[in-house]
Image (tube, grey):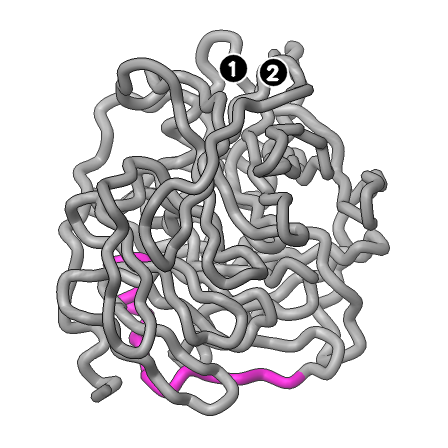
Amino acid sequence: MDTKDLFDRLAAEEQPPTTVDVRRAVTAGRATRRRRRTALAAGGLAVCLAGTFTWHGLEGQVRGDRTATVVHETPDKDTLPASGVGPLSHAYYDWCGGKWNPGKGASFAGRDCVQWKVVTRDGRTYRMPEAESVYLDQTKANYMNTSAPLRITPDGRRIAYYSAKDQKFAVRDLASGQVWLSPQTVSREAMVKNGVFVTLSPEGRYLVLNGRLRAVVDMETGRVTDVPQGWQPMTVARGGDRVIVQNDRSRYGLLEDGRVRPFAGPIEESLSDLAPDGRTVAYLDRPGPRGEGMNLPKPDTMVTVDATTGKVSRRVKFRDAPRGFDPWRIGYWRGPTQVVVSDVITGRLKPGEVPRLGEIAYAVDVTTGEVRKLGTYAFRGWAGDVVIPGM
């Protein structure tokens, strides 16, 4: 395809909300027209501390089946080394520990702390200045579009981001230091105005550009896979040969060999990545009538779908889920039968306490419904965002 036309279609901007609740605040920076329950790429964990809702948690990462706690209250001042970096636990930015005022980000200009920070599994924290993190020049029309896209592979070894210096998307191998750049130049002005949602294939080779960009890029060769008119790419399988796509009517499909095979019917929820078998996807289902915002009933069922036919394969109720379990995102697969979901951290704030923001990751067995906690990813601050590998 002609890569100069990647930005040929612009999704309409959402109007700023008149009120903000906690769950909407968490999802606000990740919502465009189809981002109401799919992954969203613009503001992150902007927090409303009204009422009894706030955030708390412990920093942690997953090592096999164990959760290890890592404290990084005072991150290292060092920037990310050029190479030799171990797998990441997560990434975050925290507005320098201050409070985020919509549309007034310019007051943070020039401060090193307004950057993505990456945390390795052994607890080291680095600033990553080469990755565009926070847009400081929002307007009234797009003030919720605050953070640039960033994605980490499930194994924590590669990271995708927008390079403001190159004005291109980049994928970096943390151990070798090799960086691959997308073939298309994308102006920072376009990024600030529109926001972009990106995902990576499990091995970190294929980059999905969603929203105004409709493409899947092989970052190692520069080859761009076109996406048929009317469809948006959502996730891509290992090897890049199968892509889950979605249209404006909540219809999903499987893109393979240049052709889309639509699923049997509309699905209102976001789908997981493709499973290791290359054909299974999953989603969280909710009981009863659907509302908006915090009126959404909690998911209680995991549904799997055969992407090659678009038909439901299995439905299982959650088992052994912790009290208050209310997952809002679904992501990658930990083997053939376990898919990872995440929940936001909520709780009460003590007087004078700075809240902890973040998410808790769980593995759900799609054959039994069993829920198992994997880890908690958090930081202290009043606003910001957390990125978990594979999510």
Res 198 quadrant in image: bottom left
Specify whether residue 29 is in view. Answer: no
Q: Secondary structure at mark 2?
A: loop
Residue at mark 2 to residue at mark 1: CA–CA distance: 6 Å
Quadrant in the rendering for residue 14: top left
**Mark 2 neighbour density, 10 Å: few (under 14) some (14–19) many (20 or more):** few
Q: Is residue 225 left or right of residue 325?
A: left
Residue position marked by numbered label 2 in the rendering: 347
Magenta span contains residue 194: yes
Q: To which residue does mark 1 refer? A: 53
Q: Which residues are magenta?
A: 178-196
Q: Is residue 291 inside the magenta stretch? A: no
Is any part of residue 358 visible from this angle? yes
Amino acid type, label 2: Gly
- Taking 282 as reference, is 4 left or right? left
Residue at 80%, 55% (x, y): give it. 121
Residue at point 82% right, 49% down? 63
Residue 344 percent location from the top left of the image: 55, 30
Q: Position of residue 60 (x, y in %)?
A: 77, 41
